[in-house]
């Protein structure tokens, strides 16, 4: 078992596994828990401390498992509860922890709670948001995240139910204390079975203005953000969950919070409030969205990215804690998105990783990120599987709002499926992911980009991640140091320092494909600093210009 210690998650690195695309053990084309178990030594070699497992619960699979029909089971496609126990033991034996995905803003419409609620069952009637229609239509003007209205009419009940995501994901009514008690039971059940914490899906959507008023109209529908995100009872609900399930337990909790601001996050993650250890904020991954949202992408502006991340570093210092991430199963691959997945794939993947991993907070690595896996570059809608992508395509192309070529270019850039293609283990058939037919296509670049080749190559993205992760354990300044921005006007360099106990860390990363001069005072990290890590051969000293996509970290004492 890992050693218990207060705040262990502050010096930890988390690895996210998206199980359907990680490793298939039985040839059905879908990854599974025994497949994860096969790869535990690989995770240990990388050096991560925690695995966050995306949902493995029974699910009709409308939203790839984020539509749960049984919170305390394992979907047969992934294995059994006994397999889960073996995974837990395998991780614990290696000193790693296992964090589960708690998806409790909504259930699947096939969850027995919803069936009972729909049938008007005494106990479950008010488990969801049911409302009569208005003027022959839905109760309010909200649109859903996955296109179309946020309400669906149910013949049986003669009312509409609310779903902020797809119609198969009805929102739970957290105003009802029985709902909250049921959620607490789920959390306690997994903790009793040996889970080490939770990533909580869209947890800042659980408190809604119970009047469910119309939102400001954007396009076809009203925006629910003002009335259903960061709602009036959110702090209370999170605190109650903490008191019931987490107090006195050695767990990691991270709340996914689209639309959270730094001031709110500071309250959620301040330990005195006993809500959450950290949150996933979205500001930095929304910066390349245009006025039309994610499928209206814009080039990234380094100045805005730096201003945003620096503000979060300053904002949570001392009174909260950051999560640090570029990627997850909902985001395109960072090397394609913010870097250069052609000529400078290795250099940009490692420079971008260095920029994030030296910050204050807990880094999250999404499967394949440590290999510099790229976007899928799929240009046929038939190759996509994600309902958000398919619904969007249908909505904009079907209605003639956007032409096919423009829509497909945006989808290729931003679709969640970019993150969901199978993990690239080898150069062989199906990238060594499955002996069957993969549920989604394998990226053809697996012949070059794969774990087997990367582990064998000391200059690979993998070994750079491995060293970044190891450094966090070796130098307290990386986990604990105070952050200070540098070169805030520079058009190419992302630079900052971290300071702790008389040590200063200088982080320099060139986010461009041109050489960049380092315009800093000579003594910025004191005399004769040590070079902790660089991403190119023959790294220079502190003030040497940075080559294209070069990153260096210097330590002065
Ligand atoms: C956030 C999850 O990460 C995403 O994959 C999912 O579609 C939505 N929440 C709805 O559960």
Image (cartoon, grey):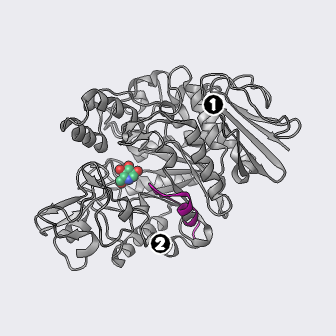
Q: Where does the image place residue 90, in percent across and percent down from the top left? A: 53, 51
Callout 1: helix, strand or loop?
loop
Q: Where does the image place residue 45, in percent across and percent down from the top left? A: 61, 39
Q: How many marks?
A: 2
Quarter where residue 167 is shown: bottom left
Question: Crowding at label 2, few (<14), some or many (≥20) Cα neighbours within 10 Å?
Answer: many
Q: Which residue is mark 2?
A: 241
Nearest the eye: 398 or 251: 398
- Beta carbon of the mark 2 residue lies under 8 A of ligand 1: no
Question: Crowding at label 1, few (<14), some or many (≥20) Cα neighbours within 10 Å?
Answer: many
Q: Is residue 42 above or below residue 267?
A: above
Nearest the eye: 425 or 518: 518
The stretch drawn in magenta includes residue 251: yes
**Residue 436, disc:** none
Q: Is residue 13 left or right of residue 186?
A: right
Q: Is residue 431 left or right of residue 276?
A: left
**What segment carries the magenta color?**
249-267
Q: Which residue is mark 1?
A: 492
Q: Is residue 259 above or below residue 306?
A: below
Q: Where does the image place residue 286, in percent across and percent down from the top left? A: 46, 45
Q: CA distance from mark 1 to mark 2?
A: 44 Å
| Residue at 21% across, 71% down | 117
Q: Is residue 122 left or right of residue 546?
A: left
Name of the residue lying farthest toward the top:
343
Quarter holding the N terminus is bottom right
| Residue at 30% across, 40% down | 389
The stretch drawn in magenta includes residue 219: no
Nearest the eye: 95 or 230: 230
Nearest the eye: 137 or 109: 137
């Amino acid at each position: 078992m890992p050693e218990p210690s207060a705040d262990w998650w502050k010096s930890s690195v988390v690895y996210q596994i998206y199980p359907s695309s990680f490793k298939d053990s039985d040839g059905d084309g879908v990854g599974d828990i025994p497949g994860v178990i096969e790869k535990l030594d690989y995770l240990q070699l990388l050096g991560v401390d925690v695995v966050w497992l995306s949902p493995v619960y029974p699910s009709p699979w409308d939203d790839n498992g984020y539509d749960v029909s049984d919170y305390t089971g394992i979907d047969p496609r992934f294995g059994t509860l006994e397999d889960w126990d073996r995974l837990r033991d395998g991780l614990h034996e290696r000193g790693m922890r296992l964090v589960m995905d708690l998806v409790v803003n909504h259930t699947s419409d096939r969850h027995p709670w919803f069936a009972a609620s729909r049938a008007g069952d005494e106990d479950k009637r008010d488990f969801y948001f049911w409302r009569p229609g208005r003027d022959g239509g839905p109760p309010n003007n909200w649109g859903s995240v996955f296109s179309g209205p946020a309400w669906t009419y149910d013949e049986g009940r003669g009312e509409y139910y609310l779903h902020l995501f797809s119609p198969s994901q009805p929102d739970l009514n957290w105003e009802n204390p029985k709902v909250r008690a049921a959620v607490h039971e789920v959390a306690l059940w997994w903790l009793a079975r040996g889970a080490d914490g939770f990533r909580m899906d869209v947890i800042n959507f659980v408190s809604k203005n119970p009047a469910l008023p119309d939102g400001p109209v954007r396009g076809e529908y009203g925006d629910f953000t003002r009335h259903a995100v960061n709602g009036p009872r959110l702090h209370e609900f999170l605190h109650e969950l903490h008191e019931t399930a987490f107090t006195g337990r050695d767990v990691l909790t991270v709340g996914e919070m689209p639309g959270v601001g730094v001031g709110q996050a500071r309250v959620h993650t301040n330990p005195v409030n006993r809500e959450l250890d950290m949150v996933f904020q979205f500001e930095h991954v929304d910066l390349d969205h245009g006025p039309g949202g994610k499928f209206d992408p814009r080039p990234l502006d380094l100045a805005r990215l730096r201003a945003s991340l620096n503000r979060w570093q300053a904002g949570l210092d001392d009174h909260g804690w950051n999560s640090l991430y570029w990627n997850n199963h909902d985001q395109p691959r960072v090397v394609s998105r913010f870097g250069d997945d052609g000529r400078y794939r290795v250099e940009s993947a490692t420079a971008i990783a260095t920029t994030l991993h030296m910050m204050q907070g807990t880094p999250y690595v999404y499967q394949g990120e440590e290999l510099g896996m790229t976007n899928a570059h799929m240009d046929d809608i038939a190759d996509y599987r994600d309902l958000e992508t398919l619904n969007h395509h249908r909505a904009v192309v079907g209605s003639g709002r956007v032409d096919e070529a423009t829509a497909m270019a945006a989808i290729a850039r931003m679709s969640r499926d970019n993150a969901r293609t199978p993990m690239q283990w080898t150069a062989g058939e199906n990238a060594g992911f499955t002996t069957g037919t993969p549920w989604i296509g394998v990226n053809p670049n697996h012949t070059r980009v794969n774990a087997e080749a990367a582990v064998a190559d000391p200059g690979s993205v993998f070994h750079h991640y491995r060293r970044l992760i190891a450094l966090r354990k070796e130098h307290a300044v990386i986990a604990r140091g105070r952050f200070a921005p540098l070169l805030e006007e520079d058009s190419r360099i992302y630079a900052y320092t971290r300071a702790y106990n008389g040590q200063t860390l200088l982080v320099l990363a060139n986010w461009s494909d041109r050489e960049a001069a380092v315009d800093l005072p000579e003594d910025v990290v004191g005399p004769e600093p040590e070079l902790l890590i660089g991403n190119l051969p023959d790294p220079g000293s502190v003030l040497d210009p940075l080559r294209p996509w070069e990153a260096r970290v210097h330590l002065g004492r």
